[in-house]
Image (cartoon, grey):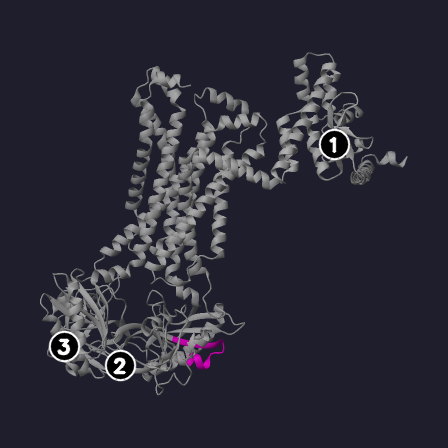
Amino acid sequence: MNWWQAKKRDADLERELRSDLELEEEEQREGGISEEEARYAALRAFGNPTLIREQTSAIWSWNWLESLARDVRFSLRTLHRSPGFTVIAILVMALGIGANVALFTVVRGVLLRPLPFHDPDRLVMLYEAGLHEDYASGSKVVSGGMYAEWKNQNRSYSSLALAQSIRVGLSGSGGQLPEKLKSALFSWDMLRTLGVQPAVGRDFTQADDSPGANGTVLLSWGLWKRRFGGDPAILNQTISLDAEPFNVIGVMPAWFDFPDSSTRLWTPVYHDKPEDTMTSFSNHMFRVVGRLKPGISASQGVADLSIISQRVHNEHLNDPFVLQSAKSRPLLDHIVGEIKKPLYVLLEATCCLLLIACLNVANLLVARAAARRKELAIRTALGGGWLRLIGERLMECLLLSASGGALGLLLAVATLHWLTRTRHDMTRVESIHIDGVVAAFTVGVVVICALFSGLIAVFSISDKRILSALHESTRSVGAGNVRATLRRALLTLEVGLTVILLIGAGLLLKSYERLRSADMGCITQDVITMHLGLPDARYGTPALRANFYDMLLERARSLPGVDATGFVTSVPGQGYGMDWTFSIVEHPPLPQGSGLSALSRSADPKYFGAMGIPILRGRTFDGGKRLDAANEVIISQSFANQYFPNEDPLGRHLRTRGKNAVIVGIVGDIRYAIGETPRPMQYYPLDAGVENVGTLVIRSSHDPEQFALPVQRIVSEMDPDLPISDVLTMNQLLGKSTLDQSFNTALLVAFATVSLLLAAVGLFGVMSYIAAQRTTEIGIRIALGAKREQVMEKVLLDGMRPAVFGLVVGLAASLEVGQLMRDLLYEIKPLDPMVYVAVAATLLSVAALACVIPAWRVSRVDPMQALRAE
Amino acid sequence: MSSMEKQEQQRVTLLQGTLDMLILRTLLYGPAHGHQIGKYIQRTTNEFLQMQHGSLYPALHRLEKRKWVVSKWETAPDRNREFKYYRLTDKGRKQLLAEESQWKQMAEAVARVMWPATEES
């Protein structure tokens, strides 16, 4: 309907109602009563003209659309009238909604979105498992021999494929420097199992995947673009990996990131790995992906494989490291297993934050509803429909939360942009983006927020006692009690939620602090580490390798300013590394089927000094014993305690890989990874020339980072094709390994801070309101002789009550929440009393601060002014 | 208790939806304005059906929107003033028949349940 038509219709209706009313009036007058009485009688017979007019014109309007437009207009006007409130409410909502949308997007991208493989639900990750679940996970990666048995004999999987992450050196070519890259070994059918095709070129064939075949390699999209300019002519070109030729047969799609997102190259496993590794049953090093046949369940598949394992185990009873069963879990679980728990905890935290934001906005709305009570009462008295008033209130909330949602979405987009750029190491980070589902989620959150905060506000005005409202607001002594109670209840809830967030943040913060201050067992200051590996093609014999290490160490030591250098297969904090089996020559043989194994490292004699790992007894390696003559071993304190409980280990012999080594020293324990307890460790001489990868450490009291370039120059002078990677100080290395924890902690602390701020603002708002309401009462009290201190104390206590209630409620709820976070905590209990005390103290002092200002202000009231103000 | 109060209690508000039918039926006698319609219904039912005239107007306009009645400003014969007269359309006549028969069926059905004995005799 056009507006002029509507206008005409309104005028018409007006005229009709007036003429009929006049007629009624005339008739009443003809009944013989006075003019004034006749008018009232006519009105009584007629009813409320405004309401009639409104209802009648509602018949003609495009009902809902027009009233919607009107509600929007009214709400906009109301909001415009109090810009301060509007801005604060929108910002609070934006914060809550933004945090939620961002985290939901991450959770959806990482955890909920199916893997980008063909029929991903049928893909499982397979492990070997023993009866004695010695390590935390209880399941192990698979040995090459067992894989072959499984593959040949199982009847449950349409295919089984194998993968291992390694690092290779890509030789410099065409003026580009050599570099160390993360690479994966695949069995030829891995891509077929996953249901993925290379974007360019071809997949591996079975013929490629054998020791005698020519080397073949698939490139990642990123590497192809960066290093080879995205030139399709790279196909069938030869590149040099670890000094061996590989023919480029294809490029993977940009999204392909299996086994992890930093993998740049893929090569066939049987081509690269020596045959004895691929047939060993005790050398566990591969990840196996299986595709279940249709109709076969995961547990049926595992049962099938376990029968095969058991048979192999029975055939090798003398080897304790041949395991007897299998385990599996969905491939998605394997990929996101680590990140799942923290993400859900963070999502819960953002939900808390959103709830707090809603409560805060509801609180503000209740305050405004109270302030507008008179207006609403008058409107009701004048015939304002009840539903209309509620509709208006809800529309107001919807506008607030929609604006908040829009702003929040922008916030979320910015956050996600930042996240994907700074945390590209995160699992599946590339699958995080805002899509239709996220948009729908945002809309849903906006509507829920509007309903939630709107309904609370509506309930607060739902008493229909118009007259009492009008009365009350003329003399507001002790007024608005109902509303104040509601607001106190909301505040209690808000404080409770804040306490939960604070406790969560406190626990993570303390746990992180514990983690970072955990003694690694070595020096972490002034040390720089560099990773390098010697390719077999050029350093095929122990002598070549030992010579390389000797020369490198000698030249590095001669750099001016270097205090100490050493070389080790992996430094503390770099991870599990490898373990070797051993036996103690002097001890009676162990029963059949059992064996010993411990973490193993190879180090040069000066490594312990360079890293500050104390030699507790004995001595370090004899530098003069090289290659086959190097027959010494050094053990860690916990190794000595565990395997030589009541004897002197010095002079005893360990037998490893067919050779005896004499124990010459005992050194202090170290942690192989931050957050892990120290494990027994055996060190063998690097001079034996067995190892071909490791880390050079350089300690200097003057800025160790300055040695990165000189050392790289030394290496490239010794071998121009040899790349150096992971140039990190010990602190950076440890920081990198605790990145997740520090990230989660930082986020949760930020959420908790924001919610504390919101709670404080809420408390301050309610206190100010209650104080303002009671100004008259307090004025009278003071006039009657109450002391200002007493008044202040009373008001303060009044305000602290919801804070204290909320604190109690929050602490109680936190007992439960702490249990949820148990897995994320390091060396502290979910009920850490220090955290609880600190949170309680923080909250109470913030609450007191928020209450003190209104309390002080009201206690300074001039009784005359307070009474006159009415 | 005075008879006046008793009467007050017996007055019932109109059943939902029957107002439309009553208005249409009233207009069957010829065009009328809102006030007349209201007065007529009240008088005919011996003031039993109590309604505020005001509630007529939304109903009248609803009927007009559905094209069951049309309206025109005309001068009233007895007062020298213009009133808005409503007139039944053909569509309105049909609607009245339909509603009437529906109401009759309903009333009979209710009666059969309420007074089965009287029905037999």
Q: Are marks 1 and 2 on the same chain?
A: no
User: What is the quadrant of the C terminus of chain A in the image?
Assistant: top left
Disc 1 marks a residue whose amino acid type is Lys
| SS under mark 2 | loop
Q: CA distance from mark 3 to mark 1?
A: 113 Å
Q: Which residues are magenta?
A: A149-162
Contact between labelled residues 1 and 3, with CB atoms less than 8 Å apart = no
Q: Chain of mark 3?
A: A
> CB under 8 Å between callouts 1 and 2?
no
Cβ atoms under marks 3 and 2 closer than 8 Å: no
Please tell me in which quadrant of the rendered image residue B97 appears.
Answer: top right
Residue A150 belongs to magenta span: yes
Q: Is residue A739 shown above or below B57?
A: below
Residue A809 occupies quadrant: top left
Amino acid at the residue labelled 3: Asp
Crowdedness of circle 1 by 10 Å Cα count: few (<14), some, many (20+)? few
Q: Disc 2 marks which residue?
A: A243
Q: Tell me the tag on residue B63.
A: none
Q: Look at the image and tell me whether residue A754 can be seen.
A: yes
Disc nearest the viewer among 1 and 2: 1
Question: Residue A813 at what x, y percent from top left?
Answer: 39, 44
Q: Which residue appears at 51% of the width and 74% of the height? A: A293
> Looking at the image, which residue is at 48% across and 22% down?
A472
User: Mark 1: which secondary structure?
Assistant: strand
Assess whether residue A705 is covered by the magenta stretch.
no
Compare residues A472 and A324 and report the one nearer the observer.
A472
Image position of A392 with respect to A523: above or below: above
The residue mark sitting in front, 3 or 2, is 2
